[in-house]
Image (cartoon, coloured by chain):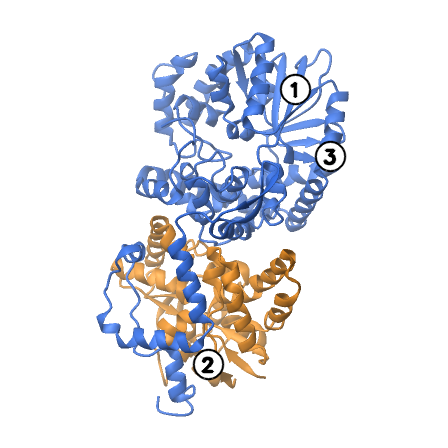
Amino acid sequence: MRVALFLTCVNDTLYPGTGRAVVKLLTRLGVDVDFPEAQTCCGQAHYNTGYRHEAEPLARHFADVFRGYDAIVTPSGSCGAMVRELYPRMGERARSEGRGNGLATVLAPVVPKTYELTEFLVDVLEVTDVGAYYPHRVTYHPTCHGLRSLGLGERPSRLLRAVKGLELVELPGADECCGFGGTFALKNADVSAAMGADKVRNAESTGAEVLCAADNSCLMHIGGTMTRLRTGMRPVHIAEILASTEEDPAV
Amino acid sequence: MSGTFVGMPAFPAAAREAVRDTTLRGNLRHATHTIRAKRARAVAELDDWERLRQAGKRIKDRTLRHLDRYLVQLEESVTAAGGVVHWAADADEANRIVAGLVKATGETEVVKVKSMATQEIALNEALEARGIHAYETDLAELIVQLGKDRPSHILVPAIHRNRGEIRDIFTREMGEWGRPAPEGLTDTPADLAEAARLHLREKFLRAKVGISGANFMVAETGTLVVVESEGNGRMCLTLPETLISVVGIEKIVPTWQDLEVFLQTLPRSSTAERMNPYTSMWTGTTDGDGPRAFHLVLLDNGRTDTLADEVGRQALRCIRCSACLNVCPVYERAGGHAYGSVYPGPIGAILSPQLRGTGSDIDASLPYASSLCGACYEVCPVAIDIPEVLVHLRERVVEGGEAVREGNKVRLRPAKGHAAERAAMRAARWALTRPGALRTGQRLASRTRRLHPRTLPGPGRAWSGTRDLPPVPAEPFRDWWQRTRGGKGGAE
């Protein structure tokens, strides 16, 4: 099986540690993962801000880069949802605008092959115990697009529960949005910040050291709020927890 | 605070005030979380919820597709049952029709059933300007009216008020409008309800004209349906001699069998009840029972324009349950008034910019009043994909394009104030379709990382005012990959 890592532009630029963790984890599980270097961005920020037509070349580029692989794995629920849920919609919209089937045809092959990391582990590799070790108290925040668009459900928590040494504590109000929302965080900064502060207070109330999620964009917002509010908690991407082992532990 | 939403500022500015109002935040948090949990339990009781939801969606879509036919059928049924049907293209026309009908009775007072359509067209203000006093009889609408306030929720218009505030409003204002509040009124719910009951009873018994909206209109028989909890609606619908109902044209269901679906989904979604306490249904007029005259004013007011938009038209499926408000994290913090419309929350954010157009500051800002978390879509009993419509309307704001306004095809210009954003999005698209450009940018950011400020100037302050920036790593992932081939080829 030819597996490609679609890291996402945000992770590539700001969170290379998450990318290294995915590679380490998948390699440990016997997957030969490739990182196609021509990859850039799925176009989600453009699409969700109202620039669908600017997002189309990015979607085409994505399809060009990843078409040849059997599976495309991404450590981002929202970028995964962009490909799976919104690429087909972009194709339909282009068709209804009288631009024919071209876009839909180009995008169609990559849609069903794109998996969010925890989906790939649980559904494709059929593992929940990935042999990880992470001796910390952790609470898990299900990010909205992973939860509602992709329907990740219990997959992330099943993976976390199987991690040796990890104590998983429930996050009150877990399924409430953290307030990131892409450009929402800037356009409606006050509401976004209020949502973030509430999320952080809920996280703090669990007594966990670590808030874990499967999307670094949300963690950037939550983590930035945590340090500003001086909570002492830290945000960690689920890939970094699952990659951590007794021989090579994550901090 | 004025009674209308004219001249509201854009959503972010209005929301900023609400976020800082700790009493409002507390009231809304308590109320929305309570009803949210109750709704979830009420819905979970039904094992065919998802099928009901899909059935509701399909019934509404089919009805909207053939709306022209069902409207004519409805008019014929209502007329045959002794009612008179009036057609109103917009708010002004509807208000003129209603005022004319009231004047023709010689009355100067009307009692009202809670109605979103009459709020939408600002009927009370229009009647007042013509010397007719309209009295709201729904408990929450009464609180809003006595408080010279604006509704902030579809179902619970006074959700932003707590018990103490309501007691103060009753004590201060009831005497001005009719029977004063009892001496020494407390803020217990039973006392507040009793004060309202006594105050309203006089109005019910005196009024000769009632005004209502309707939750549904059944085309096959011309029957109107009002679903309510308090019984005040039943009073207004049966006691007066003349009944005038103002109803949006999208409220039609073809048959009684279709109605069955919504009478299951609406109460569970709105008040978390298996069945609401009062469901009033009437068909024209009946000798010796209820109003002698019945007028139905069918309101368009932007609905036909909305129907012309193939993505946006799903907003017309809305049955005004307000489940999306109760579950929305933005509504919970921004409050209903920030939405600048009688339709607040997620549904308002897609309905107002379609019914009113995206010309004003508030309407152009509403499509952005969402983090696109999708909680609204998940609870919607007619499966309106609110995030999809929000994004579609964002596109209309920034790109302009074809739309229908007042029945005419128009080409909208892109909204002002998005020029810098548009340039940035174009530049990002240019760079991101060229992997080399992205790599160059990443390397530049990594090499200069020690020079990056901890806070951002200009528009970036919107981020760094409340959140720290993530540190830029020493090298982007792709450089590590190139160096090491994923840890296999070279030095780690």
Q: Amino acid at mark 3?
A: Tyr
Callout 1: helix, strand or loop? Answer: strand
Same chain shared by disc 3 and disc 1: yes
Q: Nearer the viewer, residue B411 or B341?
A: B411
Name the chain under label 2.
Answer: A
Quarter of the figure that contains the N terminus of chain A:
bottom right
Chain painted in orange in the figure? A
The answer to the question of whether label 3 and label 1 lie on touching residues, with beta carbons closer than 8 A, is no
Name the chain under label 3.
Answer: B
Give x and y (percent) for residue A3: 54, 81
Give x and y (percent) for residue A139: 39, 63
Residue at 55% of width from left, 22% of height from top?
A: B95
Q: Which residue is mark 2?
A: A37
Q: Is residue B226 above or below residue B304?
A: above
Residue at 60% of width from left, 10% of height from top?
A: B104
Q: Is residue B376 above or below residue B116?
A: below
Residue B453 visible to an observer of this rendering: yes
Q: Amino acid at mark 2?
A: Glu
Q: Which residue is mark 3?
A: B70
Disc ID at residue B295 = 1
Farthest top residue in view = B106
Callout 3: helix, strand or loop? Answer: helix
Quarter of the figure that contains the C terminus of chain A:
bottom left
Name the chain under label 1.
Answer: B
Q: Is residue B180 above or below residue B51?
A: above
**Of labels 1 and 2, the one closer to you:** 2
Residue A169 visible to an observer of this rendering: no
Chain B colour in the picture? blue
Give the Cα separation between the discs numbered 1 and 2: 69 Å
Residue B313 placement: quadrant: top right
Same chain shared by disc 2 and disc 3: no
